[in-house]
Amino acid sequence: MSERAISITNLSHTYPDGTPGLRGISLDIIRGESVGVIGPNGAGKTTLLLHLNGIFMSKNGNVEILGKEIRKENIKGIRRSVGLVFQDPNDQLFMPTVFDDVAFGPLNMGYSEAEVRQCVARALDWVGMTGYEPRSPHHLGVGEKKRIAIATVLAMTPEILVIDEPTANLDPGSKWSLIELLRGLSITKIIATHDLELVRVLCQRTIVLDKGRVITDGTTKHILVDKPLLCAHELAPPNAT
Amino acid sequence: MMAMVGLAVALFLVFISRIPFGFVLKHLARVSIFIFPLCVLILFTYHQGDEIARFYFLTVTSGGIEHACLIAVRALAAVILIFPLIGTMRFDVAIKALGKLKVPNKLVQMLIFTYRYIFVFIEEVQRMFRALTSRGFTGGMNGRTLRATGRLIGMLLVRTLERAERVYNAMVSRGYEGNLGTLVEFKIGGGDILKAAILIAIAIALNVF
């Protein structure tokens, strides 16, 4: 079994209007790693994440997930293996009730009714939201929505969790509670964020992305103390605690 | 006559469903905005039977009055019948029931997304109006206001499209392939069958007689 959870080789992406999203990205992510992807707005973080789940299929370059190149034939398996949590939980939670939202992925994967119910119960338990099943996502707070959004992908028992801006729009209490939740998940995590406090706490490795290119890739400990590097890419060093 | 019986049945169903009549009347008032002009139009354009009144070139006949009343009563009865349906269960349950009744999945999906995103849409509109108001926007019929409103609607469409794309991506990322599956537990008992049979019998009787 491959030790590499994700292997990206020379990946480029251009949007239909001609704007380059990614330019020649190459990186490997090892199983069990927690990797922070940081960079200014428009750096290409979300574009990169969308390639990991096959939303964007690589035309230039190659993306391998758990040793398998992403292809149309294996896309269902890839999407089960890579759980993608979007930045705005209103995009992720589109069903009328929390139960339906969490059950959506397992149902599409063809699980039996009993398995779906089990997956939903387990995922909601992981994120501490048991009892929210009949609630309408619209009536939840942002922190609660974020937790449910994570549960929607955990229900598919992914091996890789990809999260876009998990702490955006959260108050400090909800933010730290979410960080604790993510810290408790022992799977491969790729987290795109501006929140360097989160990166410091959760990620052993950090990749700085800017203008679609990997600027640097190293240990979080070293990158977060490199103020000139962070400032050059419009990032604020976290407060030391 | 049978239309009046139908209206009475609809009102009786509202009564036994314990839905407040005030709530029903409030919503009927809104629906009447569409029904009333239609009835006025029928009143003056349907010419059959004795002439009852004439206003310049417009003629009201007994047939016209009868037809306008029939349309009004039927429309009101139909609208009132919706209240026992959606007023006695959660909307998401009603949508799932439609799915179980083999209503086309695409239509069910449209209803689900309309229900889920109508609140998000309203919030978006309110936010945009607040942003406009904070910069001195006031309502009116002058060119400047209309231009600003037009741009707001345009921007709203753009944002709606962008959100639709993001929601679609979120669905696809969790294995969506065109059909929306939900797990629902509906149990049907003897009482439900009896109630359904009575209502179907009434509907058939109204249609036949």
Image (tube, coloured by chain):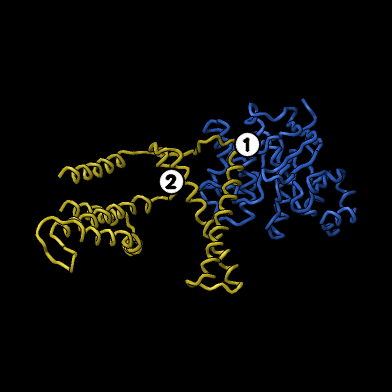
Chain colours: A blue, B yellow
Q: Is residue B109 left or right of residue B173?
A: left
User: On what subunit does the disc labeled 1 rest?
Assistant: A
Query: Pointer 1 and pointer 2: residues touching (CB < 8 Å)?
Result: no
Percent position of residue B135, x then y: 61, 72
Q: Give the residue drawn at x 25%, y 55%.
A: B12
**Where, by quadrant of the figure, is residue A108 drawn?**
top right
Percent position of residue A62, x then y: 75, 32
Q: Is residue A127 left or right of residue B1?
A: right
Residue at the farthest front position: B57
Observer-nearest of B191 and A50: A50
How many residues crowd around disc 2 within 10 Å: few (fewer than 14), some, or many (20 or more)? some
Q: Amino acid at mark 2?
A: Val
Query: How many callouts does the rendering have?
Result: 2
Percent position of residue B91, x then y: 43, 50
Q: What quarter of the picture does the N terminus of chain A occupy?
A: top right
The answer to whether any part of residue A130 appears in the image is no
Q: Which residue is mark 1?
A: A156
CA–CA distance between discs 1 and 2? 24 Å
Observer-nearest of A157 and A190: A190
Name the secondary structure under disc 1.
loop
Q: Give the residue drawn at x 47%, y 45%.
A: B110
Q: Give the residue drawn at x 24%, y 57%.
A: B72
Q: Which residue is mark 2?
A: B93
Q: Amino acid at mark 1?
A: Met
The answer to whether any part of residue A213 appears in the image is yes
Q: What quarter of the picture does the C terminus of chain A occupy?
A: bottom right
How many residues crowd around disc 1 within 10 Å: few (fewer than 14), some, or many (20 or more)? many
**Where, by quadrant of the figure, is residue B185 drawn?**
top left
Name the secondary structure under disc 2.
helix
Observer-nearest of B157 and A209: B157
Percent position of residue A146, x then y: 64, 51
**Where, by quadrant of the figure, is residue A117 drawn?**
top right
